[in-house]
Image: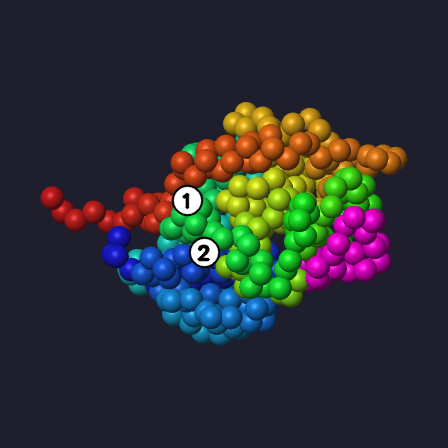
Amino acid sequence: MPPTLTWDLFCRVVDNHGDLGVCWRLARDLGGRGHAVRLWCDEASALAWMAPQGAVGVQPRAWAEAEAATPGAVVVEAFACDPPAGYVARMAAQARAGRAAPAWLNLEYLSAEDWVERCHGLPSPQAAGPGRGLVKHFFHPGFTPATGGLLREPGLLARRAAFDRDAWLAAHGIAPRAGERVVVLFCYAHAPLPLLWRALAGAPTLLLATPGHAQALVARQPPPAGVRVHALPWLAQDDFDALLWSADLNLVRGEDSAVRAIWAGAPFVWQFYPQHDGVHAAKLEAYLARVGTVAPAAATPALGAWWRAWNALAPAGPAPGPELPPAAGWRSGCAAWRAHLAAQSDLTTQLLAWLAARAPQPPQ
């Protein structure tokens, strides 16, 4: 493929900022590698705090404007959001006119389930609608070499290794006391906060509560003695990463923050996006099983019980409830899991390799 490509990345914001967070990280990574990206979004107001400085090569655009836009060389619809019909019709018109149609991919949600390997890269011929005659492909992020991998921009782990926790905390007005552990809380509205309070009550703790659901829950259910709460502002993505790097324990939600918690290498608990049909339960079990084969200390039975309770998939039980595992072994397990995943190709690199494999080869 040429050294640079024009990408159209489509994103719809459903009910949280995670979809936009994933899309912005991908767009920024592509832009940093020399590509031109138009990010078409139906609700991009969160970029004001998520990415206040913008990114090289990335142009946020209003979703409605795509209806009349000329398609780029690569079209990525995030999480099956379906680009506007007029845009897709122009993609098909290019193919009917004998010109190369854009490479069209559906970037799917992250899961550790076995079926992801079977579905990654599968074609989806369009038999009807404005894209009739085109072929869309599924691109599945995942935790094995047979999937599309995880977003990890170049230099991320080197920046993590050089990070100065004390300096960053001080620069943001956060001052842990001697002997206090630092815990980050980023959760959905249904998080069982009493479970967390019981788990933290045994040691001095500084809880850093993110805006939105976490701060609202803490306001309604104040912490026990020994737990101090610091309310955070909205943070840009780089500062959110640094926040996770600063913590002794991260409680994160959804896909984007879970991946960033993995790269942080600290103990973490993942609250999965809740689905009415209970599909998130299978995702949780698949993830714990996958981690357990590589880094058992990061997926012990005690930790599994806590994850299920935190995700409302098992009763929290009477006090004291499930206990969090010892920090030292948990941390070493998370470091081993991170190293295992870092040895695999990242998602953007795999996207570019997939495109290169499809490119017409020059005559010999």
Crowding at mark 1 (Cα within 10 Å: few <14, some 14-19, many 20+):
many
Q: From this view, report whether residue 291 is shown above or below residue 169.
A: above
Q: Where in the figure is residue 235, as x and y percent of width and height? A: 58, 63
Seen as rendered, the residue at the extreme right is 318
Q: Which mark is residue 346?
A: 1
Q: Where in the figure is residue 53, as x and y percent of width and height? A: 47, 70
- Secondary structure, mark 2, is helix
Q: Where in the figure is residue 6, as x and y percent of width and height? A: 34, 63
User: What segment is highlighted magenta in the picture?
Assistant: 209-231
- Residue 187 in sight: no
- Secondary structure, mark 1, is loop
Side (left or right) of 51 relative to 301: left
Q: CA distance from mark 1 to mark 2?
A: 11 Å
Seen as rendered, the residue at the extreme front is 178
Pointer 2: what residue? 26
Q: Please, what is the three-letter code of the amino acid marked with disc 1?
A: Asp
Q: Is residue 82 magenta?
A: no
For the residue pair 308 and 218, the one nearer the viewer reads as 218
Callouts 1 and 2 close, C-beta under 8 Å: no
- The residue at 55%/71% (across/down) is 48
- The residue at 40%/64% (across/down) is 37
- Quarter of the image where one finds residue 280: top right
Looking at the image, tell me whether mark 1 or mark 2 is earlier in sequence order: 2
Q: Where in the figure is residue 296, as x and y percent of width and height? A: 58, 26
